[in-house]
Amino acid sequence: MDFKILYFIDKLHNPILDKIMIFLTNLGDAGIFWIVLAVILLMRKKTRKCGIFMLISMGIGLIVGNGILKNVIARNRPCWIDTKVHLLIPNPKDFSFPSGHTLASFEAAIMIFLFNKKYGVLAIILALCIAFSRMYLFVHFPTDILGGAILGSTISLFVFYTAKKAEKNLKKE
């Protein structure tokens, strides 16, 4: 099923979409776009808490998703299995599940949404585009994307609600 979806997406390739997808995937490289955005949010008192929570979420995701799950599950990437598909980006060296680009994108986007619905919707759309780019570029299976999105969302919700509960408990004391 995963490959059927990837082969369908592969038929969408054209020079304009190729450039857009490469740009989108580069935004997600090492979570750098989201990290920079979190640091910018740290600079204003009004958005500082969101920036802190984003960085905490992405740190947890880095440990759990990229550090533990990728290496325990050790799933081969689609481009490693079907080497006939031409890659438009360098062949990734780490395992496939979960998608780290999607994981970081959803951790950040969901956190932004929890603090600000309007900007959060835009962030979620960008996260979805980054996630799709990983399939378009044939470096992740759809289930890698789904796993990254679910794990990233779960981590952000956990961080947000745990911090809110801790904050509420501190106010009681």
Image (tube, helix red, strand yellow):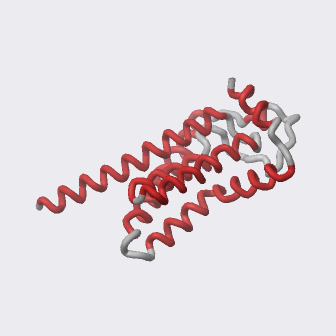
User: In the orientation shown, which residue stands out farthest toward the left?
Assistant: 173
**Which is more toward the observer, 144 or 24?**
24
Report whether 144 appears left or right of 151.
right
Q: Exactly how many numbered labels are in the figure?
A: 0
- Which residue shows up at 42% across the image and 50% down it? 156
Q: Quadrant of residue 134?
A: top right
Q: Residue at x 85, y 37 (%)?
A: 85
Q: Where does residue 77 sit, x and y in percent of width and height?
A: 72, 37
Q: Which residue lies at the image location 55% right of the left edge and 41% below the top edge?
A: 148
Query: Which is nearer the eye, 68 or 34?
Result: 34
- Work out which quarter of the rendered image holds the C terminus and state it: bottom left
Q: Of all residues shown, which one is farthest toward the top?
A: 1
Q: Is residue 31 left or right of residue 63?
A: right
- Identify whether 118 is placed above or below 155: below
124 to the left or right of 156: right
**Residue 8: % across, % down:** 77, 31
Q: Nearer the viewer, residue 101 or 66?
A: 101
Q: Name the residue rendered at 74%, 51% in the picture.
A: 21
Residue 14, position in %: x, y? 85, 46
Q: Which residue occupies the extreme front position in the image? A: 118
Quarter of the N terminus within the rendering: top right
Q: Horizontally, is 128 left or right of 86 in the view? A: left
